[in-house]
Amino acid sequence: MTEHVLEREQLIPRQRHEVFAFFSDAHNLEQITPPWLRFSVLTPGPIPMAAGTLIAYRMSLHGLPIRWLTRIEAFEPQARFVDVQLRGPYRLWHHTHEFSEQDGSTLMRDCVRYSLPLGPLGHLAHRALVRRDLAAIFDFRAQAVERLLG
């Protein structure tokens, strides 16, 4: 299994408790996900965030409908949380969100470890589509966060 890593950092000119509250509300994902994914949270809100919380989503990727189920694996208020895919398009999806104070702002760090199914076919899909799509999704997200919280 080939594991890939996507890392991003963004400095947000808000207090850490505000930024953490925004990102720990799963329904805010709809605002920071590109419209071309037609992303929606299926789990009714409010969703109490804690280790063990399950969250269901629906999206469309290249015209294919996808249902995604994640579990919050770790939840440390104001510091970090980790979501893992239980069902969805990846063989592995492990996304760590970290938040730290920096000169009156919040430094948000994302580390996504992921791998694809289907062996060599998954490797080709990563090179042709997945790597680029994830970069575009996280680029859009950074711009949306800047617009909403900047």
Image: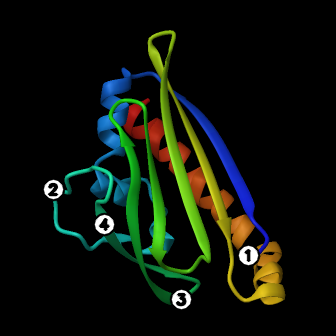
Query: Which residue was labeled with disc 3?
Result: 63
Q: Nearer the viewer, mark 1 or mark 2?
A: 2
Kindly indicate the quadrant of the structure image that contains residue 8: top right
State how far apart marks 1 and 3 are (Cα): 13 Å
Mark closest to the chain's N terminus, 1 or 2: 2
Estimate how packed mark 4 is, as few (under 14), some (14 to 19) or many (20 or more) residues with alpha carbons within 10 Å. some
Kindly indicate the quadrant of the structure image that contains residue 113: bottom right
The x, y position of residue 86, in whole percent, is 45, 74
Q: Are marks 1 and 2 in contact (CB under 8 Å)?
A: no
Q: Residue at x 26, y 50 (%)?
A: 49
Amino acid on which disc 2 is placed: Pro
Mark closest to the chain's N terminus, 2 or 4: 2
Q: Residue 119 or 9: which is nearer the viewer?
A: 119
Question: In terms of secondary structure, where does tag 4 sit?
Answer: strand
Question: In terms of secondary structure, where does tag 2 sit?
Answer: loop
Query: Which residue was labeled with disc 2?
Result: 46
State how far apart marks 2 and 4 are (Cα): 12 Å
Q: Residue 84 or 8: which is nearer the viewer?
A: 84
Q: Are marks 4 and 3 in contact (CB under 8 Å)?
A: no
State how far apart marks 1 and 2 are (Cα): 34 Å
Q: Is residue 22 left or right of residue 120?
A: left
Q: Nearer the viewer, mark 4 or mark 1?
A: 4
The quadrant the C terminus occupies is top left
Amino acid on which disc 4 is placed: Leu
Q: Nearer the viewer, mark 2 or mark 4?
A: 4
Q: Is 12 located above or below residue 126 in the figure?
A: above
